[in-house]
Amino acid sequence: MTPSVALVVDATASPLDRALIDHAFRVWAMSRRFRVADTDHADHRLHYGGSSVDALPVAGPLGGARWADGLPFAHRAQSGAEPDHLAEIAHWVSARAEAEATTDSIGRVPFAGSTAASLDADPEIPWASRHLDAFDAAVLRRIPSLGDALTTDRGGLRILGSHDIDFIARSRSERIERVAKNLGVAAIRMRDPRLVASIASCVVGNLLARRPILGDIATVMALEAEHGVKSTWNVIVRNAHRRDAAYGLHEPAVCALLDHLTEAGHEIGLHGSYTSGDTPGGLAEEFDLLRATGQPAVGHRHHWLRHDGFGLWQALAKAGASYDSSAGWSETNGFRHGMAEPFVPFDLTTGDAARVVEIPLVMMDVALSDADRRGEDAVRSAHRILDEAARHGGAVSVLWHDTTVLGTQVRRGIGGLYAQLLARGDRWERSDRMAAQYERFGVAAGLPLG
């Protein structure tokens, strides 16, 4: 039987601190598959602060970034006190460092404004998950009988394959135009002769092998079918900005494509348009448009990852979405919230839990290509990130655009890396199914989902 737990937070804590610590405790319970009950009916109780001999420690204020026992800490430690891992978990899942970050020209919080950057912490390591592990040890010192429950195998790594449909070629000429545009961007805007040579070489190779010169949805579907993988395809339904897709949701070819994907067992999610977050009710309208086609869309990723987090979660809850997977970076790969599995973020603008499950987006083909351009080992990075997630029995999303898999958009080896990841031998799941599992865990932990 799943154990039930409760946390008693010392009454002297401020309302915000009480809410943050309570939320971090529920995120821990969600991850560990525990039920959170009221203090009168819980099987086990923990105390945070106060005079109890076994009380969990209370950290000092923010601003004392430091390292201890191989972990980064955002809070100052009280002299001689045991580390306050709940405060650190709360700091990560609330993205507290991002609340005052300056957005880039697109409207995104860049890596420089992230929690990882503020702590000078390696983004390829899920630090919040490591604090969850450390909190396990703190709990066991107080409640040794929970040992069996805390050492239960949580299922190993689950990879959630996802693809954002930013372009649909309806003719050979459109493919040629897109590849020509990619060459122009590489040569003129990026001034990257190595990328130009890489794209040109892949064009020739694809022609000689009688493959399409530009990757497409059919290419990815065939690749995934070899490994028995079903993935998530996020579609743009509105074209209100030049950075939105050029295809229309109700074009016969697009409708047939979405039907083909669902008939093959894949999920269709919403790729929120470029300006949807700027328009009151915009995301709800876009979900309605997609659902009106017969697609039971429950998940979302924002186009260009253009969002501030807090407002996005509120809009998705109003739209009836179950999960989001926009919490990654456009220029860096890794764990933006420090979590190696789905979780419920804390919304600092409302002072309460968000009402959606967030699936960590830990890597993207374009960001890996940028890393390669900087001289970093992108392939090593991709495997390291997944190995770190596996260490925590995690479930994480990876994003490959169908247009990149044949090498005529990103650097040689990056598009093809997707095939390597599929062949690793990990378990792959659809995002909606994984989100539904974690929604149940979250509800049991008393989080406002469902």
Image (tube, helix red, strand yellow):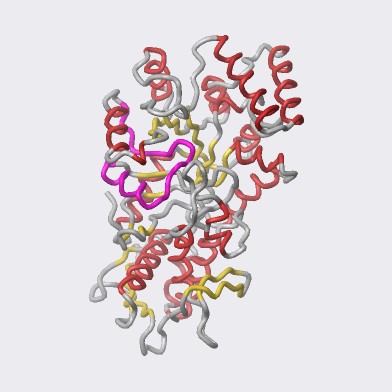
Quadrant for residue 211, please give it: top right
Quadrant for residue 240, please give it: top left
Left or right of residue 382: residue 130: left
In which quadrant is the N terminus drawn? bottom left
Query: Which residue in the rendered view is the most extreme toward the left?
Result: 40
Identified at 54% across, 57% down, the residue is 392
Where residue 245 sits in the image (x, y, percent)? 45, 25
Left or right of residue 197: residue 232: left
Q: Is residue 378 above or below residue 124?
A: above
Q: Is residue 125 above or below residue 312?
A: below
Where residue 152 sits in the image (x, y, percent)? 47, 61
Callout count: 0
Where residue 49 sits in the image (x, y, percent)? 38, 83
Residues shaded magenta: 295-320
Identified at 26% across, 25% down, the residue is 292
Q: Give yes or no for residue 275 being in the magenta stretch.
A: no
Q: Give yes or no for residue 309 being in the magenta stretch.
A: yes
Q: Is residue 286 above or below residue 66?
A: above
Identified at 32% across, 28% down, the residue is 290
